[in-house]
Amino acid sequence: MTDQKKVILYIDDDQDYLDMLRAILEAEGYEMVEARSAEEGLQLFREVEPDLVIVDLMMEEVDSGTSFVKDLKVAGAGVPVYMLSSVGDNLSMTVDPGQLGLDGVFQKPIDGRTLLTVLKVKLG
């Protein structure tokens, strides 16, 4: 049995967040693939078949993150999907993440320890 790295697809239009998350994930032995739009994220999802997806709520369009999640679920994606948002705590209080097809919501700026704890639980 090979010990392959778990692949995380992260979709965000903010290069600083892409770079920050890459540093956190790769330091812990994960592989990160990135997309800068929901459309690019869907294409990469099909190509790479990641183990987990993190998507920013607001990118090029206000609701592109939620549209992406809906498209993933329509496509039958069975991997954990997390939303990253600057309104994360408020979003969690007003919307059930499960109704959106999410496994959870992270608040920007993301706490690296919290992220890594969730990843270890979800991905082993």
Image: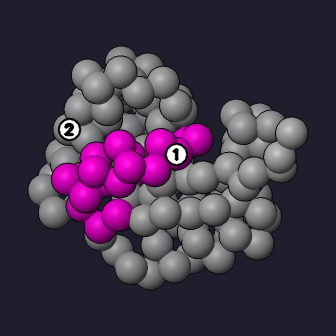
For the residues carrying marks 1 and 2, which lies nearer the camera in this image?
1
Q: Is residue 74 magenta?
A: no
Q: CA distance from mark 1 to mark 2?
A: 19 Å
124 lies above or below 43 = above
Q: Secondary structure at mark 2?
A: helix
101 lies above or below 66 = above
Q: Is residue 36 magenta?
A: yes
Residue at mark 1: 50
User: Front-most of 9 and 103?
Assistant: 9
Q: Amino acid type of disc 1?
A: Pro
Q: Give whichever of discs 1 and 2 has the lower sequence position.
A: 1
Packing grade of label 2 (10 A; few <14, some 14-19, many >=20) is some
Which quadrant, please, contains the N terminus?
Answer: top right
Q: Give the quadrant of residue 124.
A: top right
Q: In this picture, which residue range is highlighted in magenta?
A: 35-56
Residue at mark 2: 67
Q: Say left or right for 52 vs 97.
A: right
Q: Amino acid type of disc 2?
A: Ser
Is residue 98 visible in the rendered image? The answer is yes
Q: Position of residue 12 (x, y in %)?
A: 35, 63
Q: Secondary structure at mark 1?
A: loop
